[in-house]
Amino acid sequence: MIERNENLAKLSAGYLFPEINRRKKKVLEANPGARIISLGIGNTTQPLTPHVVHALERAVLGMGTPDGYSGYGDEQGMTSLREKVASVIYDSAIKPDEVFISDGAKCDIGRLQVLFGSGVRVAVQDPSYPVYVDGSVIMGASGDFDPAARQYAGIVYMPCTPDNGFFPELDGLETDLIYFCSPNNPTGAVATKEQLYKLVDHARRNRQIIIFDAAYSVFVSDPALPRSIFEIDGAREVAIEINSFSKSAGFTGLRLGWSVVPQELKYADGTSVNRDWNRINTTLFNGASNIVQMGGAAVLDPEGQKEVRELVDYYMGNARIIKATLEKKGIASWGGVNSPYIWAAFPGRQSWDIFEEILNKAFVVTTPGAGFGPAGEGFLRFSAFGHRADIEEACRRLNEVL
Amino acid sequence: MIERNENLAKLSAGYLFPEINRRKKKVLEANPGARIISLGIGNTTQPLTPHVVHALERAVLGMGTPDGYSGYGDEQGMTSLREKVASVIYDSAIKPDEVFISDGAKCDIGRLQVLFGSGVRVAVQDPSYPVYVDGSVIMGASGDFDPAARQYAGIVYMPCTPDNGFFPELDGLETDLIYFCSPNNPTGAVATKEQLYKLVDHARRNRQIIIFDAAYSVFVSDPALPRSIFEIDGAREVAIEINSFSKSAGFTGLRLGWSVVPQELKYADGTSVNRDWNRINTTLFNGASNIVQMGGAAVLDPEGQKEVRELVDYYMGNARIIKATLEKKGIASWGGVNSPYIWAAFPGRQSWDIFEEILNKAFVVTTPGAGFGPAGEGFLRFSAFGHRADIEEACRRLNEVL
């Protein structure tokens, strides 16, 4: 009889967001009239913008005609979209064949873990997006979960806290892979050029690969802060970048992202990582939806980029309201300036307890910091994605219960 | 320095279809004026149908409005679509929480391999869709490639040839997983109820899991032939089914499929496979595109099902033309009746040689049988997907060169 995959058996609990959903549903069942507002998951709420809707509509109508119809496309994405990402996002510092279009950053992280296999040693920022750890565990790149430490054996957790300015200590870090997210989910911290240079330099000296999650890069408005790891000299030899249309253009439900794997990135035996990534994409993936790719191309038009800036401004307006509320209550917070996430400190308290308190008293969903790793204990993440009226109402309620 | 994943190093050559594309491009470069017709990859060519286009358009326009917009959905798919698949496709013999909506069968196969991990022993029909083998190799479920046998060590290849009616010998088969595809890609063979009962019975007695690929089920017109493994008593304890909107509704480029994992399916330790599959989907996947899911729901409407039948009739008309051409030339072929694939025998010849000959002389792309496994040597697969005029022109040319 077939044995359960021991790596799945290792997973300590449900994936964070379904767990939050479960608790939310429970509160709703107990309070049938309650209007719950979510500042939890980073889920976009504003409609797709006119230029993008128009392109999607054209794509759909075209697919209903003999000339406009297309079936399977290249698994790596439409050539025109790869070219557009390379030129618009990277100012042609990246070549189109280094760009792989995907159905989103989360799925790309899953496939990257298949690429590197079970033998790799992994480091993550602590706190971090749960998929880096959970995915590594599923692929067999960890030992067992230690409930006391709230860590998996074999995975290196790099604490990122207010004390170190949310930038990890790199001395002695010898893993094969380093997951690094900036603007950071969940802390909202944005690494400076100097910090990323340190990271790249460390990876070069220790021959490591950085998986740089830039899914929130569009929220960086300070021109001194980097939006891509490839703004750092030498990064092409050590970094993979993943990014997405989810948060910039509201494509969370449409599913579209991309990864960049530079030609210079090599394994110890000199073979190309780009080539193996191509093989993974052609074998285990079948391309992002063609209709959605045509919408993504419109996002990268000048008109689409203008619309993205308006969406970003809207969500960042929300972030200012949330930050002001926390400040008024004397709660220290970080992020929310070049990032849609606000990381708030509740010293001495368990984050699931604060989560439950706010959910039950204010009917507001947040995300408990401990869900992102042990160093997230005592923090809550507030997401700035939401309708303005909901954010204002949520902040009124928070103002009462906090 | 990071080592290359040894499983990727094991992969013997490129994935079949990119390799065919490469050869096609080469011929095009040498013959700039040539109009190449593809009877190769099973790629749909007929436009999306009106009822589906209308639903997709409504979905797109809705996403541009505050009320119609939606962000992240459930990773397993919209509840309404899961319910509709359960009722329309399975006549409610399957429960909605046993249906997982995906971005297509190929991607589901990749995730299923992550589910079962590197420790499983895998059996495939020979010939078979390359992703079963290549994906298993990538996950570490095989040994090295043996160039003489054209097989990977550790994977059981079950020959399916005209001699055994394309149904494998099961006696002594003790692997954990059995990949089984009916209607079969590439041979076009459709397993009878009696054959599938044998398969299910064998899996029950040996406590194996069948991964039943039903991606071509919609082409089964003979009411005596099963369209789903779940038509067989006892299958709920041993089978996973994967299926897709690609070939039925022309969603090859849109990306939409589903898997069915019954609640009765258990590991040796009694834990639920459905629960682990849910964990894989929520952790490493983020749902199929919401717009495309709304199109899929329209496919399952009575109007959509009528359109599907018209598409199927069209492609099956193509299949009859191809089969007649082969018959006229005295070439034995199978399939093409309840399946869009025709499997033609060229005894004593190498399939890549015949492929090259037809490509260079007739400018017609086929698929060499050897690309599907050693038992495919000496065969070519002809796909019935194409515009009628192209099929007729291709058959005229084949008539000349064969």
Image: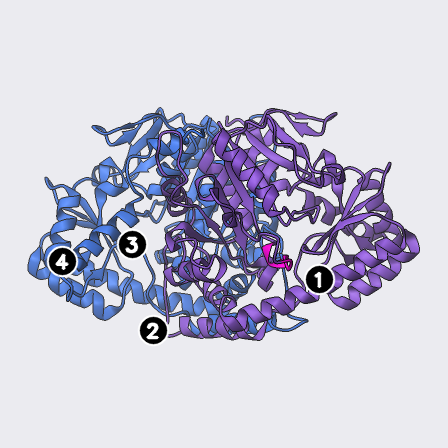
Chain colours: A blue, B purple
Place of residue B94 in the rendered image (x, y in percent of width and height, measured from the top left): 42, 53
- Which residue appears at 41% of the width and 49% of the height? A214
Give how far apart the Cα atoms at labels 2 and 1 are. 44 Å
Give a yes or no on whether discs 3 and 4 share a subunit. Answer: yes
Q: Is residue A69 visible?
A: no
Report in which chain the residue with disc 1 lies: B
Q: Quadrant location of the C terminus of chain A?
A: bottom left
Whether tag 2 and tag 1 are in contact, CB under 8 A, the answer is no
Name the residue beneath numbered marker 4. Answer: A30
Asked whether residue A296 is in view, the answer is yes
- Mark 2, chain letter? B
Q: Distance between the residues labelled 3 and 4?
A: 22 Å
Q: In this view, does B327 lie above or below A395?
A: above
Q: Nearer the viewer, residue B289 or A217?
A: B289
- Left or right of A350: which side holds A287? right
The circle on residue A41 is 3
Mark 4, chain letter? A
Mark 2 highlights which residue?
Answer: B66
> Number of callouts in the render?
4
Q: Which chain carries label 3?
A: A
Which amino acid, mark 3? Ile
Q: Disc 2 or disc 1, which is closer to the eye?
A: 1
Residue A210 percent across, percent down from the top left: 44, 37
Sequence-first disc among 3 and 4: 4
The boundaries of the magenta stretch are: B217-222
Q: Find residue B316 and name its label.
A: 1
Reply above or below: B60 against A186.
Answer: below
